Amino acid sequence: MASERRKDTALLAARAGRDREHAPSPALRRHFSRFWSHTLHDGPPAQVAIVPDGYCDLVWIDGRLAVAGPDRTAAFPVLRPGATVIGARFAPGAAAPWLKTPLSALVGCSVLLAEIGGKDTAEFEARLGDCPHPSDTMALFARLLEEAVRDAEEPARDAAVIFASTDGGRPASGLLARLGTSERQLRRRGHHHFGYGAKTLDRIRRFQRFLDLSRKAGTMPLARLALDAGFADQAHMTREVGELSSLTPAVILGQLGMPKRPG
């Protein structure tokens, strides 16, 4: 019964608050794919579903810098109404060398940056804590990362190739020839840079294609949505979406198709 209540009541983060995104500066583009902020709507606490997307993020939340590791399934954090979370999304292949930690150690975890040896973390947190407004925090966050990037290792190029292949819906099997590697090595590289192998990453990126299509699907039948997203059929989509998010495709389509709240 608890799982059924969760399916009925959980809100996708995009529905539970207001998202803002912008591209990183040229100095950061090799290491970060985007900067974002998410402000929860005011009102009673809501059960928010943070669904897997194949990425790892550096986030500023409740006055601390934390690393939000990659997820295999949805997480349901407790967030204060009206709270703003600010984040920088690592580019594929950038997180593990930056953090000096394999992402397999961070799957499903949110870890304080100071606990994994983040350089100058205390100073950065103090400076961010003095910002009077989230927009000021976002601007300073980017400047601090520009300072830190000078000492960061370069992202792994093969990880970017792995991610691009799965993101484009191409079968993971073709990666072996493209990278000139073995299946065992590919799996090891996937676990190091994404937290899981290429096949799991492929499932998660297909789920993300389903979410993107759901935002603009209108009255598209679920069977057509399944095929366009890359699922074998509607039953396959229902099973995978449920396993990754705890929600049904119909519930997600209803949430993403609803008019946005003003804000």
Image (tube, rainbow, N blue to C red):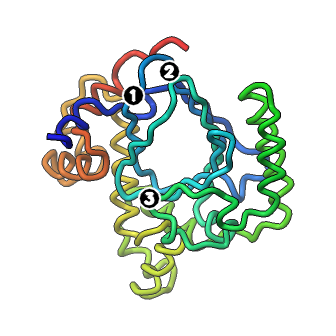
Quarter of the figure that contains the C terminus: top right
Q: In this orientation, which residue lies closer to the viewer: 45 or 164?
A: 45
Vertical side of 260 occupied by 138: above or below: below
Q: Secondary structure at mark 1?
A: loop
- Residue 108's tag is 3
- Percent across and percent down for residue 234 are 15, 45
Q: Give the residue displayed 49% in from the left and 68% down from the top.
A: 162
- Percent across and percent down for residue 249 are 23, 38
Vertical side of 245 occupied by 164: above or below: below
Q: Give the residue displayed 35% in from the left and 54% down from the top.
A: 73
Q: CA distance from mark 2 to mark 1?
A: 9 Å
Look at mark 1 in the image and give the residue it sits on.
46
* Mark 2 vs 1: CB contact within 8 A: yes
Label 2 or label 1, whichever comes before in sequence order = 2
Q: Secondary structure at mark 2?
A: loop
Q: CA distance from mark 1 to mark 3?
A: 20 Å
Label 1 or label 3, whichever comes before in sequence order = 1
- Residue 169's tag is none
Q: Where on the picture, by quarter, is residue 218?
A: top left
Look at mark 2 in the image and give the residue it sits on.
41
Vertical side of 17 occupied by 141: above or below: below
Q: In this orientation, which residue lies closer to the viewer: 51 or 206?
A: 51
Label 2 or label 3, whichever comes before in sequence order = 2
